[in-house]
Image (spheres, grey):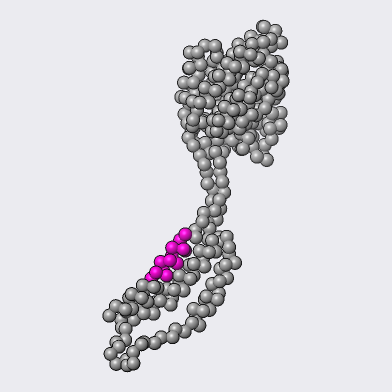
Amino acid sequence: MTFANPLLLLLLIPFGLLYFFWKERKFLGYSSLHHVRKPAGFKMVVAHLPKPVFFGAVFFAIVAVSHPQTRYLQEETALHGREIILSIDTSFSMTGTAIETIKKIVGDFIKKRSNDLLGITIFGTDAALIVIPTMETQLLEKSLERVQASQVGYQTAIGEGLFTSIAALFEREMGSQFTVKDLRNSINKEYLADYAITFIREMEKREILKNKLIILFTDGIYNIGISPDRPLRLLKRMGIKAYVVAVKASDVTGVDPEIAAQHIEDLKEGVESTGGRYYHAEDFEEVARFYDEIDKIEKDKITIETVLKKKDLYLYPTLASIFLLLVAIIIENVWMRIP
């Protein structure tokens, strides 16, 4: 236990000295003591209690104003749900119908996820985090309204969008031990480097890999940045599913049709390797199945916030002080008058 105002405890010193040097002056308002009986037995014991009881009340009052507290406690704000990053393709090929289709699907998805933490990333030539995982539906909807095609460049870096989404999922956990730059470099190789393996093992040790997933909204055709198979390989190793809701490009992609078809097939294969699926946004039945698929994913505890705080304890000495004060009053004004 600690005290917020420990100097106030010094008040106990003068009151302690007063207790030992305070001599009660007693008198009885009778001209003769002949008919007055001296208290005996239990009543005599009680007759000597007012002084220690009163000082006990003062003692607890001083302790109360010194503001006793517990030492720091760790308090968590948590819920049972999923942590989902919605990654939206805003490249030039999404101009017009494609981006509006995506925003409609994402908007409906947000409305259905009352107990999930949702975040939004966007990607074009570059990738950016728009909203960190949150339950603030209004913030998500307002942020989604502001998403426009070509917002972060004209080209399509699906790999960067995926990696930025991974970084958003683990932003709080990375701390000073891991950096986004080093993690990106460690996965952009033919194999997962030691740095990435260490990161995975640390996240496994902390038991925070459950019920996280990434949903990608794109035409599936990439032409810049790291290959999507690099972050997808990391997701697979961590046991995190990735899903794709694919739309038809509204404008030119700048990629040869045969290469574009191969990119779509590679993305589909990579997503399915994580345990996720590839859906087509033009097929309303597939979109409905997509919603159902996400609903089937088991919910788990998600720690939203961990706060170190102290618990106030002044109520207990306050109640003790009031109780003892009442006892002293009752003894002197009620008990001692009972024949």
Q: Is residue 222 left or right of residue 25?
A: right
Q: Quadrant of residue 71?
A: bottom right
Identify whether 22 is placed above or below 227: below
The region drawn magenta spans 315-327
Instruction: Say if the magenta span includes residue 280.
Output: no
Q: Nearer the viewer, residue 192 or 54?
A: 54
- Residue 212 is situated, as x and y percent measured from the top left of the image, at 55, 29
Depicted 124 relative to depicted 62: above or below: above
The quadrant holding residue 106 is top right
Q: Quadrant of the C terminus?
A: bottom left
Query: How many numbered discs?
Result: 0
Relative side of 100 to 301, left or right? right
> Residue at position x 69%, y 11% from top?
253
Q: Nearer the viewer, residue 98 or 306?
A: 98
- The prevailing secondary structure element of the residues shown in magenta is helix
Can residue 85 be spotted in the picture? Answer: no
Q: Give the residue displayed 63% in from the left and 24% down from the top.
A: 146
Residue at point 44%, 84% (across, down): 24
The x, y position of residue 153, in whole percent, is 72, 20
User: Residue at (47%, 84%) from the top-left corner?
Assistant: 23
Q: Give the image location of residue 301, x and y in percent.
A: 49, 36
Residue 294: tell me if it is visible.
yes
Residue 149's spot in the image, x, y percent? 66, 18
